[in-house]
Amino acid sequence: MTVKVLTIKEDILGMNKAKAGQNRERLHTHGILAVNVMSSPGSGKTSLILRTISGVKANSRIAVIEGDIASQVDADKVHEQGVPVIQINTGDRCHLDANMMEKAMDHLALGDIDLLLIENVGNLVCPAEFDLGEHRKVMILSAPEGDDKPYKYPLMFTEADVVLINKVDLLPYLDFDLTRFIQVVSGLNPKARILPISCKTGEGLEAWLSWLVSEMDDKKTVSK
Ligand SMILES: Nc1nc2c(ncn2[C@@H]2O[C@H](COP(=O)(O)OP(=O)(O)O)[C@@H](O)[C@H]2O)c(=O)[nH]1
Ligand SMILES: [Mg+2]
Ligand SMILES: [Zn+2]
């Protein structure tokens, strides 16, 4: 019985991977950079997306896919910024998958998008396992969550291209050891870019935005 369950899980991930490949191909055709933003609930995914929209919308066409178990509160905030947004309600699922991503893409004018930001369901566990067809994975760990999370949720940290440490404006009130955290994450994932930010004060966001713009430029060059 146990072996059967493992087989099913492998099949699900295998099928997801195949669909993710199709999504990536479709994004590539349109020269779109897709970024999957993952974190626990409340770490600052929506805040980062809103900051990113104001940082790049003058020069780039953005669209957003919002993943939540229920509600459209985050999508409403993005919509207020005049950016196309699709809300996926996952119901009983605690992560987005490539099928959901495909359905959301069906409702977007892909020819009019340079950057597709995807806010995954708030969860530090399984979103890291499901490829959506995105090009880059970004994870946010907010300082109040504690500096021990890379030990407890290593996959999320090893999969991420960028690890953003959000809410650094709160560091004076916390026991979060920034130096140790950066050392541990670098040990797990030497390629990850690790950037301390505050979506409240704007600290560190320039480095994040310049990484994103350079990724978009690379994508455009590759798609030509
Ligand atoms: N102090 C502080 N609060 C923040 C920061 N970023 C987000 N928040 C707050 O954290 C809460 C959750 O943020 P949200 O972006 O909705 O998180 P999400 O659930 O990951 O999308 C909100 O009350 C935000 O105002 C930050 O850098 N500093
Ligand atoms: Mg949110
Ligand atoms: Zn899940």
Image (cartoon, grey):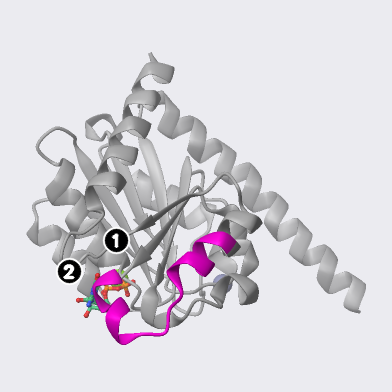
Dot 2: element: loop
Residue in the picture at 51% in, 74% down: 94
Does any atom of ligand 1 lie closer than 8 Å to the CB of label 2? yes
Residue 146 in picture, x, y percent from top left: 47, 81
**Residue 181 inside the magenta-drawn segment:** yes
Residue in the picture at 41% in, 24% down: 29
The amino acid sitting under disc 2 is Lys
Residue in the picture at 9% in, 37% down: 58
Question: Where, by quadrant of the figure, is residue 209 drawn?
Answer: top left
- Magenta part mainly helix, strand or loop? helix
Residue 147 in picture, x, y percent from top left: 50, 76
Residue annotated with mark 1: 197
Residue 82 in picture, x, y percent from top left: 8, 51
Of residues 104 and 198, the one nearer the viewer is 198
When the figure is inspected, residue 28 is found, relative to residue 192, above or below; the finding is above
* The residue stretch that appears in magenta: 168-183
Of residues 189 and 38, the one nearer the viewer is 189
Residue annotated with mark 2: 200
> Which disc, if any, is residue 36?
none
Quadrant in which ligand 2 is drawn: bottom left
Does any atom of ligand 1 lie closer than 8 Å to the CB of label 1? yes
**Around disc 2, counting alpha carbons within 10 Å, would you say few (fewer than 14), some (14 to 19), or many (20 or more)?**
some
Quarter of the picture containing the N terminus is: bottom right
Give the Cα separation between the discs numbered 1 and 2.
Answer: 9 Å
Residue 11 in picture, x, y percent from top left: 76, 57
When the figure is inspected, residue 140 is found, relative to residue 172, above or below; the finding is above
Quarter of the picture containing the C terminus is: top left
Dot 1: element: loop
Residue 185 placement, left or right of 47: right
Of residues 196 and 52, the one nearer the viewer is 196
**Residue 146 inside the magenta-drawn segment:** no
When the figure is inspected, residue 70 is found, relative to residue 120, above or below; the finding is below
